[in-house]
Structures are given as C-alpha cells and as structure tokens.
C-alpha cells in the first residue's frame, strides 16, 4: 500500500464490512458477535446500547479502495463509511431476531464477563463520517445497509 502512497491511520474507526446478499454463504457463525450471542443465548448491548458503529458494505469498501488507488492523494485518510452510526441496540436487536434469542442490556461490569475480549469493542462509540471522502473521490456507497444485511444473513448453525 505504501508503494501507492496509501496509509492506514491508527485512529480510523472499525466498521462493519459485510458480504451480505452478495455472498449467500456468509453466515452469522462467521462473526464473533454472533458466536457470543449464540453461546450465551442472548444478544447483548451495554447500557441503553446508544453507542454506535460506522458501517459499510464490503462491495462499497472495495470500490472506495480502487478509487483511492486510482485517484487518492498520498498521505490523506479516506473513510469507507456508508452509515455514520448504527447503534448497538439496533445491532443487538437484529442479531436477536436472527438467532431467535432475547436482547439484554448489560452493565459495563457485566460486559467483560459476557463478551470477553470483544467487550472493548462492544462498548466503544465510533461514529464516523465519509463526507470528505465522498467529496474528494466522488464515492457513493450503494450496498445494503447493516440492519438489512443482518436480517438477510444465514443464521443456520
């Protein structure tokens, strides 16, 4: 990547990039979030679940990656964000519906026991914007939104 003048900043937010409908074999069992919910028998969020994650479909991320390689300026950061902030409450609700388990709210203290290593991520509030990226590169995400994708995912064991 550095050969192309691209860098990855340490402060870039994690985001959901999903195969969704473009790959019907994509299964909920492929993700730690779903594995934990299946094992614990509940889909959890911390507190009110108001913390947010930015999201983008993998096809949109791939198109942006190609645009950055083709037209991106060296040293700039580009955010592959289609949705600025999907709440953990919404995500837990979609996971719960897909797995047929209840949704629960945990305290921060309970989250460590429930999520294990994933607790750090489950409690982060990470909204992000791609406004500048879209303006600079003309990128327009068109893939499925996260909640629609979660509803269409294969939740088979």
Image (spheres, rainbow, N blue to C red):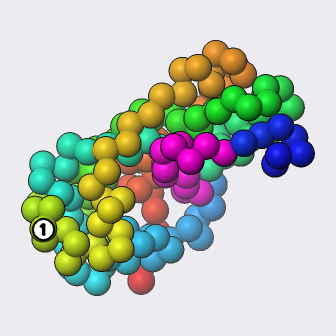
On the picture, is 156 further left or further right than 11? left
Q: Nearer the viewer, residue 36 or 96?
A: 36
Vertical placement of residue 116 versus 124, above or below: below
| Residue at (86% x, 32% y) in the render | 70
Q: Position of residue 120 (x, y in %)?
A: 32, 62
Q: Residue at x 53, y 43 (%)?
A: 12
Q: Quadrant of the C terminus?
A: bottom left
13 in the magenta segment: yes
Q: Position of residue 102 (x, y in %)?
A: 15, 68
Residue 21 against residue 7 in the figure, above or below: below
Residue 100 appears in the picture as rendered = no
How many numbered badges does the structure rendering display? Answer: 1
Is residue 137 among what the camera can see?
yes
Q: Quarter of the image holding residue 68? A: top right
Q: Quadrant of residue 21?
A: bottom right
Residue 16's place in the image compared with 24, above or below, is: above
The local secondary structure at tag 1 comes to: helix
Task: State the residue in front, 38 or 106.
Answer: 106
- By secondary structure, the bulk of the magenta-drawn segment is best described as loop
Residue furthest right as drawn: 3
Q: Which residue is mark 1?
A: 109
Give yes or no for residue 135 being in the magenta stretch. no
Taking the image as shown, residue 21 lies to the left or right of residue 115, namely right
Q: Residues within 10 Å of mark 1 (few under 14, many from 20)?
A: few
Determine whether, in the image, residue 25 is placed left or right of residue 32.
right
Residue lying farthest to the top in this orientation: 135
The residue segment tinted magenta is 8-20
Residue at 59% over, 38% down: 80
């Amino acid at each position: 990547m550095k050969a192309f003048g691209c860098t990855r900043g340490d402060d870039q937010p994690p985001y959901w990039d999903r195969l969704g409908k473009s790959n019907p074999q994509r299964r909920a069992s492929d993700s730690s979030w779903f594995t934990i919910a299946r094992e614990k028998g509940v889909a959890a969020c911390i507190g009110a679940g108001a913390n947010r994650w930015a999201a983008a479909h993998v096809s949109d991320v791939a198109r942006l990656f190609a645009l950055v390689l083709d037209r991106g300026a060296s040293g700039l950061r580009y955010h592959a964000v289609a949705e600025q902030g999907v709440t953990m409450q919404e995500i837990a609700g979609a996971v719960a519906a897909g797995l047929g388990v209840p949704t629960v709210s945990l305290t921060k203290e309970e989250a460590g026991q429930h999520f294990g290593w994933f607790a750090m991520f489950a409690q982060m509030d990470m909204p992000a914007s791609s406004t500048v990226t879209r303006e600079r590169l003309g990128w327009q995400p068109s893939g499925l939104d996260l909640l629609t994708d979660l509803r269409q995912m294969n939740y088979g064991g």
